[in-house]
Image: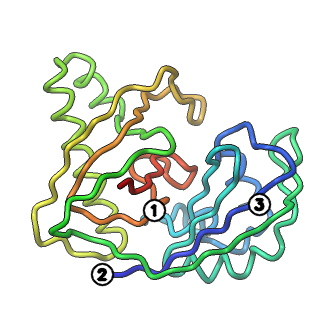
Amino acid sequence: MTLKMSVVTLKTDCKISMDATKFRGFIASKFPEQILLHQHEGKGFVYLYPRVQYKVIDGMAMIVGIEEGVDVLQKIAPEIDCLNLGDERYEVIDKRIQEENAKFGVNSVIRKYRFLTPWLALNEKNYERYRLSNKKSQKELLEKIMIGNLLSMAKGLEYVVTEEIKVILDVSPTNERVRLKKVEMAAFTGSFVTNFTIPDYFGLGKSISRGFGTILRTK
């Protein structure tokens, strides 16, 4: 399967010193008529794999558009000339838009990926299970969760998985907890190998529209 995707990279006059949460809020409020930017409509929340995802990587802002999200980014990208993030204002001094048709799905080739941003794998229930387990059981639990993340992403992108997904993780907890909506969450960093092809800059896990769990293929 191939997916249409685009990556808008915004270089600002100084590096952004926060995660993508405020970035997402700014863009969503600037273009409230574009539902895919915030995933809310009159009836409530739109539950699907986010077609628009916001990232801050190495101090640089990025927006990833997937399928119908590509058309949205084509409309809004020319109008983004500054970012007002909390008390900080960043001027956009360079803008790059890259579009491609990316491969997606189970593959016979094993590929390695690393997390560019913290992976939020655990909810309150499985965090307790993780905390009380030994290292071997912790690794097995996280690998099952990763497979679940991949299955959820596939379903949200209307891809039918007909073969077994395999994952081997090499991750460790981050030194600091991530705060999300005033709740502290355990986060992980590191890499994994899998027989599932994932386009660069896609997110896995919780709160991926806010930039968490962003991956990049490594050689």
Tell whether 87 sits left or right of 202. Answer: right
Q: Which residue lies furthest to the front in this view?
A: 219
* Dot 2 amino acid type: Met
Secondary structure of residue under mark 2: loop
Q: Which of 93 and 182 is in front in this view?
A: 93
Closer to the chain start, of discs 3 and 2, is: 2
The residue at the point 54 percent across, 55 percent down is 209
- Secondary structure, mark 3, is helix
Residue 91, quarter of the rendered image: bottom right
Tell me which corner region of the image, top left, top right, bottom left or bottom right, holds residue 164. bottom left
- The mark that comes first in sequence, 2 or 1, is 2
100 and 31: which one is in front?
A: 100
Q: Mark 2 points at which residue?
A: 1
Closer to us: 162 or 94: 94
Residue drawn 15% across and 35% down? 140
Q: Which mark is residue 200?
A: 1
Classify the position of the N terminus by image quarter. bottom left
From the viewer's perspective, tell me whether residue 84 is left or right of residue 41.
Answer: right
Eyeballing the image, is 100 above or below 218? below
Q: Mark 3 points at which residue?
A: 29
Question: Where 99 sits versus 179, above or below?
Answer: below
SS of the residue at dot 1?
Answer: loop
Q: How crowded is mark 2: few (under 14 residues within 10 Å), some or many (20 or more)?
A: few
User: Which image quadrant for residue 106?
Assistant: bottom left
- Give amino acid for label 1: Asp
Question: Disc 2 or disc 1, which is closer to the eye?
Answer: 1
Quadrant placement of the C terminus: bottom left
Tell me where residue 84 appears, x and y as whole percent: 85, 50
